Amino acid sequence: MRAVSASTVINDPYRAGVALGESLTEIDPEVVFLFSSIHYAVPDVLEGLHDGLDRDNVIVVGNTGDGCFGAGGVSDFGAAALGLNSHGKVQWRLERIDGLQDGVDGKLERLMERLAEKDKEPCWAYLVSDFRVDVSRIETTLRDRSRFPIVGGLAMDDRRGANCFVYVNREVINDALVVLAAYGDLGFSIMLGNSQRPVGRPGTIEAATINQIHRIDGISASDFVERETGKPVLQTDRGILSVRVVGPESPGEERLRSIMFKEAVNSGSLSFFGGVNAGDSVQVCQASQEIMIAELQALAEALRSSNRVPAGVLVISCTGRKSFLGALIDNEVAALRTAFPLGLPLAGFASRGEIAPRQTASGYTHNLFHNMTHVAVMFWQ
């Protein structure tokens, strides 16, 4: 596998696309991942990218985010791209779903069936969706219907939550979900970071509806959080307090859920970004800049110590982490940059939510939906 990345802050979308495309031509990419701030979400950026590449037979997939990640750091405004060329060892397939408000789980289930036609299952896939979707249905379908690692997330804008767009070849679309599946000899590893400081004792969810927890350990969800933290949930806790959720039958499949600060559906209930289920264990966690940064540094150091150098890296990191880290957000890519000082092709985006399995000693868990999580995919040479 060969990889190359590029980034730009050129204001004009077409010229920005041309600059990215011309920077990627050195490896004649089979696939290009394109990420940008919301300001570039017009067909001109894709036309420019294809003109810069000077070829049509390349698959382009990507989306807008709360800024983008490049080899040089994190940008609130701009675009970044990662090109891959497997020299024919990997076959790529692009599938999409339109109309996410109408039976998205059934549509995604049929998409997964199409990807496994003729008993040829993908080895890995990238998935991106418009954030205006019932993500609990997506997670359930991926958990039950996919048997290969899937990494991705929800597209985003500049943290307003007003709109987002997905890139598919020459199209700029929304109200859609796109999957890029890889078949064949693709070497990759998935690195996931979302360690947070636990606060108090775990409890058991007794009553929940989709993404709302009503009762934990015989008391309301808000009373449980207050009991364990010693104070009520406040607007100022946005991005600081989360809960770690674990299913009773899958102790290794931990997911973070951020609290949605809005009017409770009923007294004491709390809403979250992502699905929750009765019977799950839940523990309040508090975000820490020091823990976030140290975890990524440790993961990057372990990667460096393995004496393997990735061809390129794809990064999806939560917009909540970006907000919480503030001026320290460059640390989301700085650890990898420091571990591989000779240069590492890298691109990604700040997302509304992240999709990835956890790596275990025996392989990968089911595909899970996360909040406040950093996901990096290493593509091996």
Image (spheres, rainbow, N blue to C red):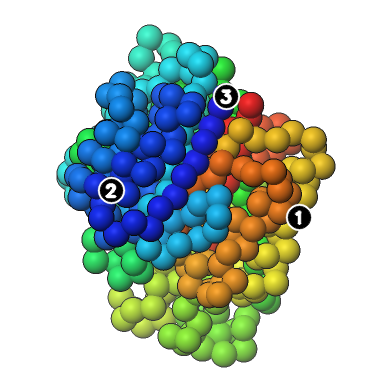
**Residue flagged by tag 1: what amino acid is it?**
Ala
> Which residue is under mark 3?
1
At x 43%, y 85%, the residue is 235
The residue labelled by disc 2 is: 15
Q: Earlier in the sequence, mark 1 or mark 3?
A: 3
Task: Examine the rendering and report whether any part of residue 339 can be seen.
Answer: yes
**Closer to the observer: label 2 or label 3?**
2
Looking at numbered disc 3 in the image, what kind of residue is underneath it?
A: Met
Q: Give whichever of 340, 348 is nearer the camera.
A: 340
Instruction: Indicate which label's residue lies in the foreground, 1 or 2.
Output: 2
Q: Is residue 58 left or right of residue 202?
A: left
Residue ID for mark 1: 298
Q: Whole-Å distance between the Cαs marked 1 and 3?
A: 26 Å
Q: Secondary structure at mark 2?
A: helix
Q: Residues within 10 Å of mark 1 (few under 14, many from 20)?
A: few
Residue at screen point 32% across, 49% down: 16
Give the position of the C terminus as an image quadrant: top right
